[in-house]
Amino acid sequence: MQTSPRSLAAGRDVFLDLVRAGAILAVVLQHWLMPVLAFDGTTIATGNALTTPGWWAFTWLSQVMPLVFFAGGAANLLSLRRAASTRAWLAARAQRLLLPVLPLAAVWLVVPEALRELGVPEQPVAVAGSIAGQLLWFLAVYLVTVLLAPVMAAAHRRWGLAVPVLLTAAAAVVDVARFGVAAEVGYLNAVFVWVAVHQLGFCYVEGPLAGLGRRAALGLAATGFGGAAVLVTSGPYAASMIGMPGAPMSNMSPPTMVLVAVALGQLGLLLAARPALTAFAARPPVAAALGWLGARFMSIYLWHMPALIVVTGVAVLGFGYATPEPGTPEWLAAAPVWLVLAAGVLLALLRVVAGVEARRPARSAPPALPQLVVAMTLGAAGLLGLAARGFTTPVDGGWQAGPLPWVALVLGGFLLARRALDVAELAGRALAVWQRARRVAP
């Protein structure tokens, strides 16, 4: 049995840092390389390179959201153990998740109209606003997962590995109902699937995954990927772990139990390589890079798609560039240039916005638990609304049809998580306003 290679300095686990950094880099590179773009003067076509025959196999490794939830679960349990109180922990987590969204929202409240004033046709404007908001689904689900974390930590202490097993079983039941009764039922798995994977992070900190040897880890990888292969070949599940345009179903939206199997496969491979990965992460240049990425994780995630939009606007709409056929020598030659351009824009954006992520949460007394529940629920609802509707207001719609109501929910959630409200004081102020209104009423 191996012991968990946690760095005692600063209570950090460099393996988790490396997993999280690798996951965010994989997300960025995949999102920058997937689009197959062309513009005919009024409409931008947005294909997906992963629809190339056979390329679905890459998604079994490149779909790294399970690793993000796993690393988040481990980090959350470690920090929750060190927190002064559950309320303080929830308040800090809510602020750190919601605050970096506010600059993005502020920019995108004005960008669509600015693009229209520059003469950009309506369809590309709508596509840009949609893409800028789509990835907020992750923060919405993760916020709910964080809210549930104290309860799930207590469940982990009592039942251990049985918790993710039961959550996976619940996800299987939801899948059966999704394919046999009503497709909408599948969205329950946004909780069951991702909380199950988040719970695997708990099992890494305190549980069977903590001391998994190389042979056992490889067995876990074989079991996970083998289980996913059986489900895909014998069931209604898609082969790709990323939603594909025109596909009859998606394993991601809503998530299916296949993602839990893929998560086990990916974790098995990483845990088998953990000693080598830990040694690699300890090298000074790598450690410095991990520190830089870790301090900007949220900003990179939120702004890498706006960076892609900028490059697309200049190259595709401005100069008529069209993506070569994926996999061809022309595509392979153009991909590095495309990545360098997008990375340059992202780095410029990070110089402006990354300081927001570095701000410490409010040091005042944390709000009461009911207020935090309301705050995080409002924030998650606002993020889901932006993910579903995007940042573009329809030309024939009023402000209520655009992103402003959803942004207001996110802002309200952040403010409620930041400061404890004095209910008696608020009630007194409301009564005073009502009394003044009665006096001036005709």
Image (spheres, rainbow, N blue to C red):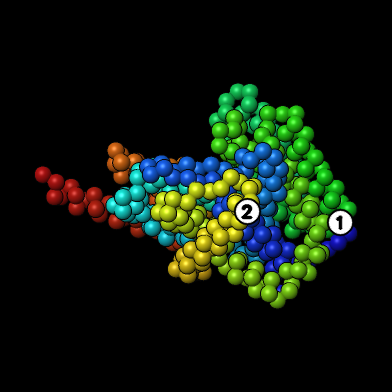
Q: Quadrant of the C terminus?
A: top left
Q: Secondary structure at mark 1?
A: helix
Residue sticking out furthest to the front: 329
Q: Position of residue 22 (x, y in %)?
A: 67, 59
What kind of residue is marked 1?
Arg
Q: Quadrant of the N terminus?
A: bottom right
Q: Position of residue 233 (x, y in %)?
A: 75, 31
Left or right: 204, with 322 as reference point: right
- In the image, 103 versus 33, the foreground residue is 33
- Closer to the camera: disc 1 or disc 2? 2
- In the image, 427 versus 92, the foreground residue is 92
Q: Which residue is mark 1?
A: 214
What kind of residue is marked 2?
Leu
User: Residue drawn at (63%, 40%), measured in percent from left and top?
Assistant: 52
Residue 39 seen: yes
Checking the image for residue 332, the label placed there is 2
Q: Position of residue 183 (x, y in %)?
A: 57, 28
